[in-house]
Image: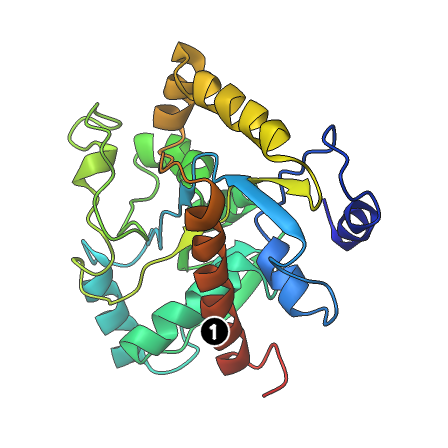
Amino acid sequence: MGTDGLRDERARRGEATLLRAPRPGLRATLEGMPGIPVVTGYLALDPAGQLTTLGPNGSDLTAVWLGEAVAAVKAAGGNKFKMGGTGSKQEDQIITVAIEKAAGVKFTYIPFKGGGDVAVQLVGKHIDSSVNNPIEAVAQWRAGALRPLCVFDDTPMPYKAKVTDTMSWSDIPPCKAAGVGVDYLMLRGIFMPAGVTKDQVDFYVDLFKKVRETADWKKFMEDGAFNTTFMTGPEYAKWVENAENTHKTLMKEAGFLAP
């Protein structure tokens, strides 16, 4: 749901049948459109499996983990290595900016239409590394065509089943442990319009809790290497507020927003 949908939602205050699962780029979209509230006026429910983003995946870089990769980028000089991601001025480019800031390097960022395209371009050696969702690059990793360098979370993923002959999701270190002090969790949540009642909110929170306990949900979480953190109410609203502040800082540093 884009900005038109957000405006429509604001006009439908109190409608308990309207649920919104915003696209991952919501934060970047809102930050670039003054006058559209990010948190105020919306009732946050559940970060339905916050996604940990996998990458960069260096197909030609000889590095094992991210710290070694950025050392090679730094030695080569600014803008010599190409980083691929989905879209411009969205999460993937913002993550790239965060890596640049933390490691003191500069990539040439190349935008593509989606994560599948990004993985194909990396395997084809048209870019040197990428930031991508785990599920969008797992087939190429399993085939040995690329390799993960770190996960943008502050702890390893809990999934211990082998994805390749030698590695599981849990074997991939957090980026901080791999040598670069950066973490990033993408927004995965359910929102309702302002003005709904507590009973209406509780109905959906209870429903989502039941869904989370199903075998299908748990399999999807593991197959996609999702972070399964569950938050509601003030705790989740605070998380969204902190994410907003992080995005504002990174987008200003990247020149995406006015100072």
Secondary structure beneath label 1: helix
On the image, the x and y values in percent for residue 225 come to 35, 33
Q: Can you tell which quarter of the image residue 83 is in? A: bottom left
Q: Can you tell which quarter of the image residue 74 is in? A: bottom left
Does residue 37 appear in this view?
A: yes
What residue occupies the far front of the structure in this picture?
A: 198
Relative to the observer, which residue lies in front, 118 or 189? 189
Q: Is residue 116 above or below residue 112?
A: above
Give the amino acid type for the residue marked by disc 1 in the picture.
Leu
Q: Is residue 100 above or below residue 126?
A: below
Q: Residue at image x 72%, y 72%? A: 34
Q: Is residue 155 above or below residue 36?
A: above
Q: Is residue 42 left or right of residue 67?
A: right
Q: Which residue carries the number 1 mark?
A: 250
Does residue 124 appear in this view?
A: no
Relative to the observer, which residue lies in front, 249 or 111? 249
On the image, the x and y values in percent for residue 168 come to 21, 31
Q: Residue at image x 33%, y 44%? A: 146
